[in-house]
Image (cartoon, rainbow, N blue to C red):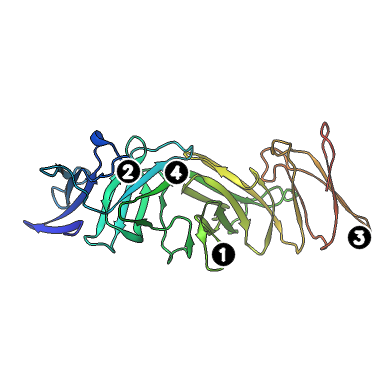
Amino acid sequence: MQPIQQVPLGGIAFEVTTTIVYVDDPFDGKVPDDLVSTDYKRIRIKVVWEGAFASRARPVVLVTDIAPKGVETNDGGGTISLLVFNSDGSPLPGADLHIVNSTVEPQVDLTVTSDSFGRVILPGALPALESYEITVTKDGYSTDRTYSTSEVTNPTKPHMSVFEGQVSEASFAIDQLSGLTINTYGSRTAGFPVLAGVELRVRGEKIIGTDAQENLVYKFDKLIQTGTGGDYVYSDMEFDSYVVEVVDADYDLAGSSPALPVGLGPDEQLSLDLSLVVDSLNSLLVLMTNTENLPLASSSARLVNTLLSYDEEMESGNVGDPDFGHAFFGALNATNYELTINLTGYEEATS
């Protein structure tokens, strides 16, 4: 029997989803203390349909438990133990875990929900090598999942394996989705005019594996272009640390507010402003911060090369500007320079 079946009846197409899982009852202990964890089976049947009297958000659901007449026996297989937690590392109840395996018979295609401890334990799983595909999410939350080698050559979280008589464990991190708006502006000297149509690369820090050349593969890595208003809006970003690179050949990054990389927390709305200048072959972007890595306005950055008779001084951008705490030096030579930072009340810094 297939997990999902289409059943026509009376001119209406009914979709019947059947889920059968083993239950590890706490009465006699749970895995790993309970050596025979396949205590009984729980069968859940959900029926939905379309038409004049469609089920919509109110499907018909029937649930029953089937227990052996005598003492429990070990039917074989292994145990899948999954943990879901949020960005703080706290267990997350109510998450939906979709588990699929088309390499075993009968095939597996079921969705289960994490308990109050963020856990899902499935005894009696059929043994299989890296073929249990698991996707974890929740309404309004990000998604975490396993990956195949066809998606990522060396995934950090491959599809799960199950071995006879063993417990296979995996953990997943999800949290509420956030919004990120990226705005592109011109230079400070031009008064920070809005710049439209700027090509950018937005990349998170979460890694899902490496490719065939051992290069890192990032979970979020996209090329975008700002719109006519000089902005690009993401409404479904997950918690992570993000960097933004200017890939448009016409521009260099001359500063950002807040400073890059930016940390985006769960359920947060963040606006990131970028200041751009005309591209030059060699340039230097300086970010001036205190010991707590907070940007400092009106700091003096002096760049010197006596052999080239080069001596330029710039102040870091002000609070509220797209280049807050930054100073940009363009059209430089590929050689050594001395950089000196000064701000009243602070020690001088030299590089």
Where residue 287 appears, as percent x and y from the top left, is 73, 46
Crowdedness near tag 4: few (<14), some (14–19) or many (≥20) residues, C-alpha within 10 Å: many
Disc 2: which residue: 120
Q: Nearer the viewer, mark 1 or mark 3?
A: 1
Crowdedness near tag 2: few (<14), some (14–19) or many (≥20) residues, C-alpha within 10 Å: many
Amino acid on which disc 2 is placed:
Val
Is 122 on the left-hand or right-hand side of 89? Answer: left
The reply to whether dot 3 and dot 2 touch (C-beta < 8 Å) is: no
Where residue 218 appears, as percent x and y from the top left, is 52, 57
Give the Cα separation between the discs numbered 1 and 4: 30 Å
Amino acid on which disc 1 is placed:
Glu
Give the Cα separation between the discs numbered 2 and 1: 33 Å
* Vertical comparison of 334 with 206: above or below: below
* Vertical comparison of 249 with 339: above or below: below
Q: Nearer the viewer, residue 143 or 18?
A: 18
Q: Quadrant of residue 310?
A: bottom right
Give the Cα separation between the discs numbered 3 and 2: 67 Å
The reply to whether dot 1 and dot 4 touch (C-beta < 8 Å) is: no
Element under label 4? loop
Q: Residue at x 35, y 46 (%)?
A: 81
Is 296 on the left-hand or right-hand side of 88? Answer: right
Q: Earlier in the sequence, mark 2 or mark 1?
A: 2
Q: Nearer the viewer, residue 163 or 239?
A: 163
Residue 214 circle label: 1
Q: Quadrant of residue 340?
A: top right
Disc 4: which residue: 177
Element under label 3? helix
Give the Cα separation between the discs numbered 2 and 4: 23 Å
Amino acid on which disc 3 is placed:
Leu
Residue 308 circle label: 3
Residue 313 circle label: none
Give the Cα separation between the discs numbered 4 and 3: 51 Å
